[in-house]
Amino acid sequence: MKALWSPWRMEYILGDKSGSCVFCAKPQETQDVENLVLYRGEWCFVILNRYPYTNGHLMVAPYEHVNSPTRLPPETLGEMMALVNRCLEALSQALHPDGYNIGMNLGAPAGAGIKDHLHLHIVPRWVGDTNFMAVCSDTRIICEALDQTYAKLKPLFGPETGS
């Protein structure tokens, strides 16, 4: 196996996770560029993952602090899925991935790093890129600074509806 190089993840691994919920705190702040918030909808928002496995790793989260989609009202679920489509369109246009992983990790046993606030991952994938499970063959990471990826994606989300 070749080395999987993701030095930015150490900040997350060693960081204090006992503080406030990032999915509650970031939308309340106004520094969208610094916080990597790409879009604010009525019930949900899109944020670039600060500790990605591949370039363009996005997350869609509701403003409401819940741990399961079963606790969300229909309009929030609808907007969440509409934002998934919007993310796919923006990522396709900006980064041209070969495919995507889309999903939620519900609860710590399922791998949720932030288990108390539901969020949906959209991970662009390229033929030959790394997998976020154990890697057994050649690996490579699509490398680009977060601020460069943000600058590519932000204009593709268009006007916001509010928060």
Image: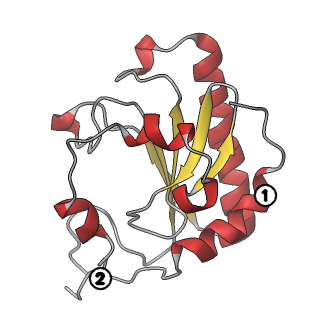
Tell me: 98 left or right of 64: right
Check the picture and name the quadrant holding the C terminus. Answer: top right
Task: Look at 19% across and 85% down and name the residue there.
Answer: 1
Instruction: Give the residue type that dot 2 points to.
Output: Trp
- Where residue 95 appears, as percent x and y from the top left, is 65, 71
Q: Is residue 58 above or below residue 83?
A: below
- Where residue 107 appears, as percent x and y from the top left, is 23, 31
Task: Look at 51% across and 70% down and name the residue there.
Answer: 55
Which mark is first along the chain, 2 or 1? 2
The disc label shown at residue 5, or none: 2
Per the image, label 2 sits on a secondary structure element best described as loop
Q: Quadrant of residue 97?
A: bottom right
Estimate the spatial distance between the alpha carbons at disc 1 and disc 2, rounded to whole Å.
29 Å
Q: Quadrant of residue 67?
A: top left
Residues packed near mark 1 inside 10 Å, few (<14), some (14 to 19) or many (20 plus): some
Task: Tell me which colouring the rendered structure shows.
Answer: secondary structure
- Where residue 54 appears, as percent x and y from the top left, is 44, 69
Which residue is labeled 1 in the image?
156
Instruction: Give the residue type that dot 1 points to.
Output: Leu
Could you say which is closer to the camera, residue 163 or residue 141?
Answer: 163
- Where residue 69 appears, as percent x and y from the top left, is 44, 20
